[in-house]
Structures are given as C-alpha cells and as structure tokens.
Image (spheres, rainbow, N blue to C red):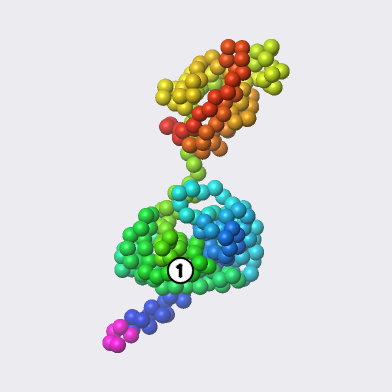
Amino acid sequence: MRAGSAGVLKQLSLELPALVRNAAPVIAAVQAGLGHASGFIWAPGTLVTSMRATGEASVLLPGGRSVRAQPLETSEDVGIAAFRVAMPGREPVLLPQAGDLAPVGSLVLAIGAASDASPTARLMMVSGAAVDGVRLDGPLDMEAEGGPVLDAGGRLLGMALVASDGGCVLLGVAAIARALAPPPPGWIGVAFQPTLVPLAMREEAGQDTARLIVHVTHGGPAEGAGLIAGDIVLTLDGIGMTGTGTLRGFLAGARPGREITARLVRGGRIETTRMIVQADPNPS
C-alpha cells in the first residue's frame, strides 16, 4: 500500500468515530409493528423511522431513556413512519441537512441503533440512482433500517431503508419532508349559509339547524354528486353541519381522495349522496 493511501485511511479512521458520536444523541431504538428498527429525531418532538414500525411504539434513546411515542400521519407512498415523542430534558441538537443527495461514488455513513440504543455504523458507497433517493452498495441490517445516513461532513442525507431485493436505499431528506408535510385541505366546491331545518322535518333529521347551499362550483365534487343550490346539508360523514366553521373543520381532516356521504334535505325529503373529496384548488 502506498504511503499516501495509508494516510487517507488513517485520517478516515480518525474522523468517522467523531461523526458517529455527533449523531448518537438523535438516534433511537424503536420497537413496534414488525419488530426492532432504528430511528432518529427529525424535528423537535418528532422521530422518523421505517414503515416496519407501525402503531404505538416503544422508543429507547441513548443512555437507556425510554420515551412515549404516538404515531403521526405520513404520506402513504413513502416508506417511513413518524412518531411524536416526549423528550425528557433538553432536545438534542439536530443533524444539519445536506442540500443535495450524494453523487455516485461518494462514501456515506449509515448509522443505526442497537436494541439498547447504542450506535452502530456502516460505511457504504453510493452506487446508483433510486426513486426519491440513491442506491447504496451493500446490504443493510434490518435493525439499522430507519437510521440516518450522513455525508463525509456529517450532514444528514436521509434515511437508510432495505430495498425489495435486499439491498439498501437512501431515502433523501426532501422525500422525508414531503412525507411529513400536512395534507392539503379538502374541497367539495360548495358555499354554505346557516339555515333552519324545516319544522316538519326536524324530528326525522335529528337536528334543528343545518347549512343551506347557496353556490355549487362547476366541475367540483358537489356538482358531480348532484348537489344544487337550495339543498340543505344536514351532515357530512355523520358530522352535523350545525355551527360556524363546521365545513372548514370537517374538510381540514378530510384527505383528498376520500369518499364521503352527504345527508341532505331536498324537496321535503331526506336524501343521501356520495362524493370524492378533492384537494383545495385555492388553499388559503
């Protein structure tokens, strides 16, 4: 081995442990769903890990501190899970994020957490492109899945995931951020105003107040479902449209693509119809 090569390896051996030590305070061992996985603190009070961790989770931080974890909603098309964690004491310093994914040929450090939350590490090379990330050149221990991947400067590149062929994929920070972004508000394309349920129908309707449709947007879900101005909407998916802001509040939690049932008064009769919530074309 040439002297120059030996020097490079020696320097690398000196610098890698420092990268691991710097990342250790944000890594965690996650026990949930299909078993043990690694995870890391993405934002204050938010831990991310792989999709193998589902439902309620037991999270162990370095030093043996066990914390409560409540699942958070994420985009279904990205292979991660997220949890709200109650951190004891001060929040750890978050890893700085890299602006871009590492190019092919770059060395990266995949950091995981053993069952006692002590750090593990694997030096890998970026070997090619992948959807929302890059391929890494070696297999990944299942326990290390969900852990952070760092570049040579210790910046966060993303999360290490086991690929379907048994290899390793680095899911970039941009993809993680998209998965954690709140869903756009739902929209059905109507304008309401408060109204009273006709007196003769209040017993059947089960409520005294409702919302009168005063406008239906052309091409919107409500028009597609046959709703028209003058219909009195009683409920959407069983939620009474009885108070100020009830439609806005309902649609804030109605993910686009969800089918909902509207119960309404039309022509002296109570009817039901279904429609598909869309993303708000003009979110405020």
For image coordinates 54% across by 14% down, the residue present is 230
Over which residues does the magenta segment extend?
A: 1-6
Residue 4 counted in the magenta span: yes
Helix, strand or loop: magenta stretch: helix
> In the picture provided, is 150 more to the left or to the right than 92?
left
- Decide: is 3 above or below 125: below
Residue closer to the observer: 218 or 84: 218
Name the amino acid, label 1: Leu
> In the picture provided, is 104 more to the left or to the right than 268?
left
Residue closer to the observer: 179 or 45: 179
- Residue 162 picture quarter: bottom left
x and y percentages locating residue 140 in the rendered image: 45, 68
Packing grade of label 1 (10 A; few <14, some 14-19, many >=20) is: many
x and y percentages locating residue 61 in the rendered image: 60, 66
From where the camera sits, is residue 185 visible?
no
| Residue that carries the numbered disc 1 in the rendered image | 140
Residue 121 counted in the magenta span: no
Total numbered circles: 1
x and y percentages locating residue 197 in the rendered image: 65, 16
